[in-house]
Image (tube, rainbow, N blue to C red):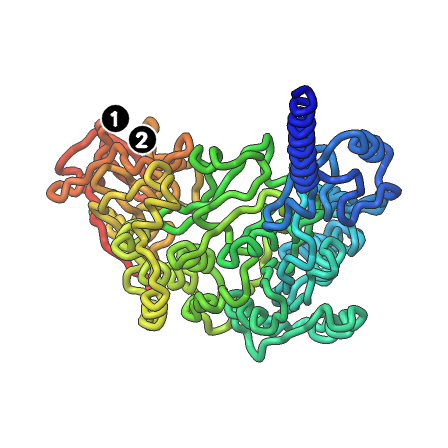
Amino acid sequence: MFKGRLWRFLILFLTIYIISFLYFLHSFNSNTDKTTTTSPLPHFNEKDVDSNQQQKNKISDQIIIPNIENSLSNLEPVMTKGILGNYEPKNIVKLSDPGENGEGVQLQGEEEKKLGDKSVAEYGFNEVASEKISLDRHARDTRPEECKYWNYPSVDKLPTASVILVFYDEGWSTLVRTFHSVINTSPKELLKDIILVDDFSDEEHITVRLPEYIKQWKGLVKYVRTKQRVGLVEARVVGARAAQGDVIVILDAHCECVTNWLPPLLTRIALNRKTLAVPIVDGIEWNTLRHNSAYFGGTLFRGIWEWGFLYKETEIPGRERSKMKYNTEPYKSPTHAGGLLAIDKKWFFELGAYDPGIKIWGGEQYELSFKVWMCGGQLEWVTCSHVGHIYRGPRQRSMHPKGASFYQSHINHLRVAEIWMDEYKVYYLRRRPNHAQLDMGDTSEYKALRQRLNCKSFKWFLDNVAYEMAEKYPLPPANLVWGEMRNEQYNDICADTLGNQYGRSVGVSGCHGQGGNQLFRLNTEGEWSVDEHCYVADRNSVVARHCVQMGRWIPKGEWTYNNETRQIRSTKVNQCVATDSKILVLEACQNNNRAQKWTWKETYIV
């Protein structure tokens, strides 16, 4: 009996031992799938980093860190706080040249300053200051610190990029520094080509010198010249057709790319080919070329617009912020500023590229944004992709193509409203009533494209994407009266803004029938306005204020217009608008005073 018990005990012991061993093997394999060894990250060379980074790596040798290769198998970026990401440069050499690290350059002496002013009048930038700066200068790293620790998919998993730069008689150094910057900051495996689209320039440094200069890159940089001036929008499409990369990246021809700007953009498109990815656009001063951060204090913004198609940015809503684990993640936006973007080439042309009826510039960012969202895509701002952009100064030379309509940007906006905004088009015309008679051309082809792509309604877009519009820029009420304000006592005198801005008074001048400074709106809720300036009574004057107050435009005001007495009355001070033919004033209302009577004439541009 004892031997029988012993035998059963041995069998039980062996069974427990085998089960335990199998469980150990399973646990070991499972843990191996979820953790890494202490080998370096892809593209990581410990010898190249500074002493602080080496110390971080020594610490990482003693702890378990995420397996970047396994984690990136689904293309999602991976954060490794304190350990440089896989595309971050190691051992950046700091130079001492003028303008290095995005610093500005000040001109010395009267003669040099005169030459600088002359170049600003010609190009909109100070080319004299620019020429003192290396074509290969390092831009200021304006990214949040956290951006340095993102890891993106390896080059074999990302699409290739074609960078498109459109220009007309651009300054030499700002143009060349742009594509030098693209080359210097982009992984060579991801940069398929750079397409320089010359929109029929006149200057020899473009037409002769540039094609010769780019030969050193042996086909990486390509020069394409249009056969006539076609304008920015069409020239971009010319560049997109010539591009050989999977993704077209559009930049203005006066930009400087910040460290590791390209992989974050391409990753968004690798994850969803119908993504329009937009970098954060920093400002570069036109006079000194100092590179400044776009935003301060960590606040995140996204693009919207007001109903007259003036581009605006607003802090991202809580609904979007709540989706983010890290402050440096990309986030969705209704629209963008228009100059800098990345989009899958095939998707771009599936959407009809840019509407060919949108010419020169203006409105193209809304057209592309609306149809991306409404036709099954999405638009994202990519927080860790930064590009510096020079905003032009007081350029005196006109860049408008000869023979093109002076009102082309208005025509563009009218087409966007007609094709994409459905019943909401009326709100654009309330803000721009004088545009209603412009010839926008045939829109049937793009309306058919919208139907073919089974695109959603503009109401869907407002409800689901641009939902903050209802709060920030509510639908404008109908106009009670609008147009030219002509005085009855002084029949050739009209109210005129005189170009005055915030805090300045409305005046009067001779009626000229051209709108512009003499085109006013007074809506049914009492708002009296021109463009973004709303008018208020201030003692005995009428002065301009910003319509947007505390981040909101509330389209209501203090004014009434009586069709019988033809008086404009302030309900705040109970006085009426009058003129002595020299100035515009507020005074006690008198029904029989002809100097207080105003006739409104609707004035259209055609």
Compare marks 2 and 1 and give the one earlier in the sequence.
Answer: 2
- Residue farthest toward the right in the current orientation of the protein: 47
- Tag 2 and tag 1, C-beta contact below 8 Å: yes
Q: Determine whether 463 is above or below 249 in the image.
A: above
Q: Nearer the viewer, residue 73 or 275?
A: 73
User: 474 left or right of 564?
Assistant: right
Q: Nearer the viewer, residue 597 or 169?
A: 169
User: 252 left or right of 561?
Assistant: right
* Residue at numbered disc 1: 573
Q: Say what amino acid the circle numbered 2 marks.
A: Ala
User: 224 left or right of 424?
Assistant: right
- Residue farthest toward the left in the current orientation of the protein: 564
Q: Determine whether 127 is above or below 520 in the image.
A: below
Q: Which mark is residue 537?
A: 2
Q: Which mark is residue 286?
A: none
- Residue farthest toward the front in the current orientation of the protein: 1
User: Label 2 to label 1, Cα distance in Å?
Assistant: 7 Å
The residue lying at 58 percent from left, 79 percent from top is 227
The quarter of the picture where the N terminus appears is top right
Q: Say what amino acid the circle numbered 1 marks.
A: Val
Tell me residue 5's x, y (percent): 65, 22
Tell me residue 456's x, y (percent): 33, 56
Q: Nearer the viewer, residue 247 or 496?
A: 247
**Is residue 108 at all visible to an observer of this figure?**
no
The residue lying at 21 percent from left, 27 percent from top is 574
